[in-house]
Amino acid sequence: MNRIKRYLKIYGDRDRTARQVVPQGYRGPVTQAEYEGTDSYNDNGVILFEDDLRVVIATGLDTPSANVKTGDMVQVWILHRTLSPLGAIRTGRDNVICGSCPHRGIRRLKANGRYGVVGRRCYVEVDKAATGIWRCYRRGRYRHATASQYESLFGGRYVRFGAYGDPVYIPLDMVASIAAVAKGWTGYTHQWLDSAYVEYRRFFMASVDNDVESFTATAQGWRYFRVRATSDLTVFTNEIRCPASAEGGNLTTCDHCRLCSGSTGDMEGRKSITIIDHSRIAKSQPLISITPLAATA
């Protein structure tokens, strides 16, 4: 218990990982074995997968999500395993969880001699829930879940793959197993141009940011989710406005709608979805156009 208390004292309240501060004698995160028999676990979340770079965590198992748009869905997060969400963004290493997403922004050297990220349009406020979940993980407070537990964890529940991070970094067999027992799910990926992830189109929507990408995604067999500039009123014949958005009349929430679930089953052939830009900087820096991924590959 002394090691546990020492670890929590060092990492319990402050995120030092982004500054690469390693205390003398540090032996890594407290392991699950060291927590056995204690009451230190957070039962609102579980670890689904982790490797050297990433960790996949499901939350909202006990306490419903407070997200008004998505409703009561289990939230699945893809996080950098050793860097906090903010630390990963500042160092440019969020690419291991976000891939080629153009909303990440660009890391540049500023006039003051320090690096900073410019043009970031991601709607996720990573300094809030994502950071809290990552810290909880680093304290060793989440149990590891096994496939045999998916029915009890996700059975009859709605699942949001990718509350933060791109869900193609979740093993495909894991996605399929969770979707098989869940009542419904949603998911979006910016990696749809990479042929390595083509099988994920069964479960996720292609995230597209312009007309060219929407046509390309459709040609490759993906249903898509297209973000439009606030001045763009165009809705194609194969699209509908997101019914869980203000422009769509807030007719429902994602957990009841579930149209953003790829091409599995009765979703095949359904219309794609479009929405007005809802990023954090949509008002201060209106979306005009985002360079197609194919042009930057």
Image (cartoon, rainbow, N blue to C red):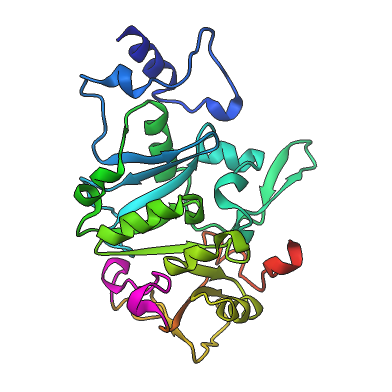
The residue drawn where x is 34% and y is 46% is 58
Q: In the rendered view, would you say 205 is above or below 64? A: below
- Is 233 on the left or on the right of 11, as rendered? right
| Residue 93 image position (x, y, % from top left) | 63, 41
In-front residue for pair 65/190 = 190
* Residue 29: quadrant of the picture: top left
* Residue 269: quadrant of the picture: bottom left
The residue drawn where x is 47% and y is 19% is 28
| Residue 240 image position (x, y, % from top left) | 43, 84
In-front residue for pair 188/67 = 188
In-front residue for pair 203/294 = 203
- Tell me where the magenta segment starts and ends, as one range: 252-268
The residue drawn where x is 42% and y is 74% is 263
Q: Can residue 49 be seen by looking at this rendering?
A: yes
Q: In the rendered view, would you say 285 is above or below 108? A: below
| Residue 293 image position (x, y, % from top left) | 68, 66
